[in-house]
Image (cartoon, rainbow, N blue to C red):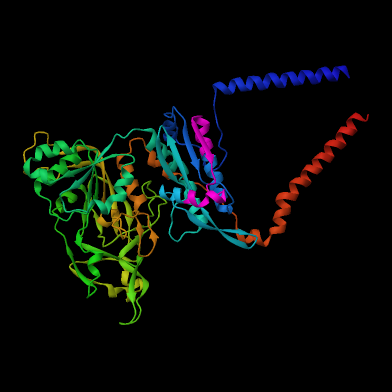
Amino acid sequence: MKEAKKQGLKQLGILIVGLIALNIFGNYFFKRFDLTADKRYTLSETSLNLIKQVDSPLYIDVYLEGQFPGEFKRLQSETRQTLEEFKAYNSNIIFQFVNPLEKEEEREANMKMLYQRGLTPISITVDDKGKQSQEVVFPWAVATYNGKVTKVQLLKNMMGASTEEKVVSSVQHLEYAFADAFNKIIKEKQKKIAVIKGIGGLHDLQIADFLKSVRESYYIGPFTMDSVAKSPQRSLEALKKYDMAIIAKPSKRFTEEEKEVLDQYIINGGKTLWLVDNVQAEMDSLYNESGSILAYPKDLNLTDMFFKYGVRINPALVKDEQGTPIKLATGDPGSQTQYEQYVWKYSPFVYPESQHPIVKNIEGVKFEFTTPIELLKNDIKKTVLMESSQYSKAIGTPTQVSLEMVTEQTSPKDYQGGGRLPLSVLLEGKFHSMYENRVLPFKDASYKNVGKDNKMIIISDGDVVKNQLDQAFQPLELGYDKWTNNLFGNKEFMLNCVNYLLDDNGLINIRSKDVDLPLLDKEKVHENYTFTQILTVGLPIVVLAIFGFLFTFLRKRKYAR
């Protein structure tokens, strides 16, 4: 008996020494193992480099606490796992899950407060064994660091998608959503963006929501092209101080001097985001007595410039069967006005199929009177980000556009030989000056024929970045259509374009991460509810009982001798 006791104490001592040694070893060597097939819990190198910069507490409040259906519980658990990964690499990251609607007496005040902060709620259906009830959920998180605050959208808006599909897409972007939020509040603004003025572009109110969102990460300033006429050299030097230029829906013809300024800005490494309408046609103009307008080509004097860079924006309208909805008044004169929803084929609803990080898994984008982009052969790498559906075609201009077309009958035969027309293209490479081997509009001692590696994005529609206004002429969220109450993916698309053009650390590449997220089949669960309960609750108890019986039996048998 004494020998057995000594042996037991010896084993206990070895175990204690081993545990102490393991803890000491763990203090000096840190390693986490991700056993999932898709490595969903493995943080990218970009994320790790970012959170290393967190040297004081970074607080995260996650408003995903409460009674949720299965899909939201999965989003809740995946969010928790992602934040635990961040915290494992930096203890300064502190998070908590909060239920803002837990206390009934504070429910209304909290909902109002969160809504005012831009955290829009959603209504979900909770199904408990056939009994359905409606609950309000705020699928958001708020991150705070050194007095800076930013919000994190946890559930993606996807028009027409089921909750399960939204959750899968949202989980794929959790790491990027949090990393992007951390980047906004950890790093000081460095990059500067010029919004080009003096070109007859969109009014500030019409791009207010876009500018407000971009201003969270970058400095923004207006740059007027009117100064070029007075001193083009000085204007070029001033523009070179900006990292990026946004040219949103120009309507005035560019002069050769203005083009040289933009050309040399690009050759010297300036990023550009072009949103160009090559056809004059406005949706507001259609709502007249005749319900029709004449769409005709615009002369912006940019054809030769884009040609040199490797694209041509053709003066034609894209007509697409996969259009966005519009509401039109119906009914006989004198009767009460009624509104019906129709598909407007000159406003393509584009679901990106490209796997590029800019557009991967984003919601469909609404275009309006867009034109096709033709890709030309040169040394520039071209990536089509957005294209029309297979049932689309280009309509030459000038042409009459009428609201009556909403009632026309079409078939796939009408689109033979058409479809898949590029509407947005990313250009990357060493651009050649459009004035190469040509007489310069103005003398520039620093003129270059070939630039260093650069990139630009061309979108053949200026309205992609345009937000609507409410009755008080205040800007609504970019992508929201107040007439049909739909929210499109325009905002995410535009912000991704800016982030990609200015992103030096590859943050946006995190969006390429694929996550395989199997979800429960609700119908099968309801059909086999009793069996499922026995399997998930009863079976573990039976297994424990068998184990306990065998353990007791073997122990008695051993010591009964």
At 16% from the left and 44% from the top, the residue drawn is 262
x then y, percent, for residue 481: 35, 61
Q: Is residue 448 visible?
A: no
Magenta region: which residues?
Answer: 83-111
Question: If the image is split into quadrants, where does the C terminus sit?
Answer: top right
Of 479 and 395, nearer the camera is 479
Q: Is residue 121 left or right of residue 536?
A: left
Res 18 → quadrant: top right
From the viewer's perspective, is residue 111 above or below residue 189?
below
Q: Is residue 533 visible?
A: yes
Question: If the image is split into quadrants, where does the N terminus sit?
Answer: top right
Is residue 101 highlighted in magenta?
A: yes
**How many circles with numbers are drawn on the protein?**
0
x then y, percent, for residue 148: 39, 36
At 33% from the left and 33% from the top, the residue drawn is 188
At 42% from the left and 31% from the top, the residue drawn is 49
Q: Is residue 480 left or right of residue 109?
A: left
Of 442 and 52, nearer the camera is 52
Q: Which residue ends up furthest to the right in the rendered image?
A: 561
From the viewer's perspective, is residue 93 above or below residue 196?
above
Is residue 247 highlighted in magenta?
A: no
At 78% from the left and 42% from the top, the residue drawn is 544
x then y, percent, for residue 83: 51, 38
Of 451 and 90, nearer the camera is 90
From the viewer's perspective, is residue 513 above or below residue 344?
above
x then y, percent, for residue 463: 27, 57
Q: Is residue 552 left or right of residue 15?
A: right
